[in-house]
Amino acid sequence: MNQTGGVKTDRLDAIRSHLYANGFSTIQDLADAVGASLATVRRDLQILEQDGAIDRVHGGARIAEGSSVEMAFQEREKRQLSAKRAIANAAYELLLPRTAIFLDAGTTVLQLARLIRINPMPLRIFTNGLIVAQEFLNIPNLEVVLLGGQLRSENASLVGPQAEAMLETIWFDQLFLGASAISPDGAIYSVDSAEASLNRRMLTRSANGYVLADSSKFGTMATYKVAPLNAAKLITDKGLTPQWRAELTNFGIDATYAELGAKE
């Protein structure tokens, strides 16, 4: 894409992000936020409306109904993206052809799914993530199984008793699990009770579990405990502080530190 096209794409992304974060905004608000003229913003809004991303109303715009979940996921996906991609590269190197793996619905695990899509190998892939599963449409050498269950819109994931019951009939060679937070007590936490329960069950159904968590997740808290971090091996990035590295050693956690800026 040429430079002009790149600037335009960045501006469209900035408008979407502003509307997601702030709700309804006037054209003047958007022009101030993205540093563009009123005429330019009007043209951008027309493009976004045609794409179904926004609704133009009463001299301004808002995120289109039904797209807020997608936007929330996209915003999380962009955070610490370099670290997530480095972690995904390290995880990809652990994959073995003709094995069964489980990919959860997290945004770091999504980066691993995208690497598999680009460089596929014969794998049987199970997932509870709708967006993760979509990455594998029409990709050769992959057998993909999506868990059934209750749709958790906030993470585009399937959870609940049906999903957990299905897990009881499956065994994985490898599990790749994201984390909402890694608390000071050395445990994995989630923002959702059903997600936490399903994640706990995943850990009992895999020969080798890997937690993919970028360094910004450490020292943070969420509501529902999943498991002690030493229930799985850890892949994080080299941005993790020396204090936390020492803590991981004290907790007896086997950690791999991915190099930031690894090849995408």
Image (cartoon, grey):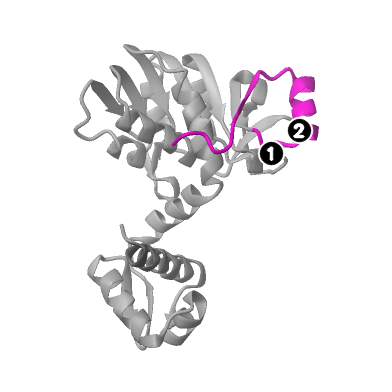
Q: Disc 2 versus disc 1: distance between alpha carbons?
A: 8 Å
The reply, left or right, for residue 201 in relation to residue 117 is: right
**Disc 2 marks which amino acid?**
Trp
- Identity of the residue furthest to the front in this view: 2
Q: Is residue 235 magenta?
A: no
Visible in this render: residue 198?
A: no
Label 1 element class: loop
Q: Which corner quadrant of the image does residue 250 belong to? A: top right
Q: Give SS at disc 2.
A: helix
Q: Quick check: marks 2 and 1 in contact, CB under 8 Å?
A: yes
> What is the total number of numbered labels drawn onto the structure image?
2
Residue 47 image-quadrant placement: bottom left
Q: Which residues are magenta?
A: 238-264
Quadrant of the frame with the C terminus? top left
Percent of width and height locating residue 177: 50, 29
Residue 224 coordinates in the image, percent (x, y): 62, 39
Residue under label 1, please give it: 218
Q: Which residue is mark 2?
A: 244
Residue at image location 32% in from the left, 61% down from the top: 2
